[in-house]
Image (cartoon, grey):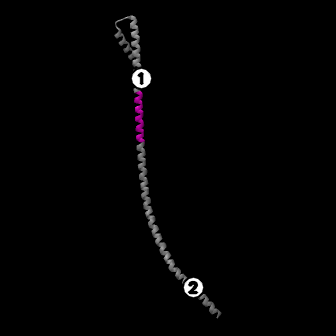
Amino acid sequence: MIKYNEAQSIRKTYEHIVKRLKDERVSFDNQIGALDRTLQSKQREYEELLLLSGDASHTRDVSNQTLQKERNEFEVNRMKREAELRERQQLVKVRKQMIERQNRREAKRREIMEKQMTESDFDGTSGKRNSIQDGACRAEEVEHR
């Protein structure tokens, strides 16, 4: 009888194990189904992310090209403005030189005229006007040289 009881105990243990395995098989099938659904969902998300990544990469490239184009355009405009500024500064410099030269001529003319007037006062000549004009002309000739 001991062997019979032992066999019954072993049989019950195995039946319990079999029952447990059957229960786990049902839950395992459910788990596999859930994992399959999750895998498919993740695969779709991955494909969408790949598309978004491609779009973002294209947009980034277009933006970089636009930025580079704008930078180049800005640089060209800056160089034009600088050239125009240098040109205007040169023009102002030339005009200042012309005004300065003109002022010096006027000063020389006045000086010559004053000199001739003082000389004519001493001489008492009547040819004042001709000598004054001659002196002014000579001053201009000297200035041009």
Q: Per the image, is 56 magenta? A: no
Q: Which residue is mark 1?
A: 100
Quarter occupied by residue 138: top left
Q: Measuring 43% from the left and 53% from the top, which residue is drawn there?
A: 61
Q: Nearer the viewer, mark 2 or mark 1?
A: 1
Quarter occupied by residue 142: top left
Measured as percent of width and height from the top left, residue 78 is found at: 42, 40
Secondary element at tag 1: helix
Q: Name the residue nearer the viewer: 96 or 1.
A: 96
Q: Measuring 41% from the left and 21% from the top, which residue is drawn there?
A: 101
Measured as percent of width and height from the top left, residue 13 is found at: 59, 86
Q: Which amino acid, mark 2?
A: His
Q: Quadrant of the N terminus?
A: bottom right
Q: Which residue is mark 2?
A: 16
**Which one is earlier in the sequence, the residue at label 2 or at label 1?**
2
* Whether residue 145 is visible: no
Measured as percent of width and height from the top left, residue 109 is found at: 39, 16
Q: Measuring 43% from the left and 60% from the top, which residue is drawn there?
A: 52
Please indicate whether residue 40 sits to the left or right of residue 1 in the image.
left
Outermost residue, bottom side: 1
CA distance separating discs 2 and 1 = 119 Å
Outermost residue, right side: 2
- Span colored in magenta: 75-94
- Above or below residue 88? Residue 41 is below
- Above or below residue 42? Residue 136 is above
Quarter occupied by residue 48: bottom left
- Above or below residue 90? Residue 21 is below
* Whether residue 45 is visible: yes
Q: Main secondary structure of the magenta part?
A: helix
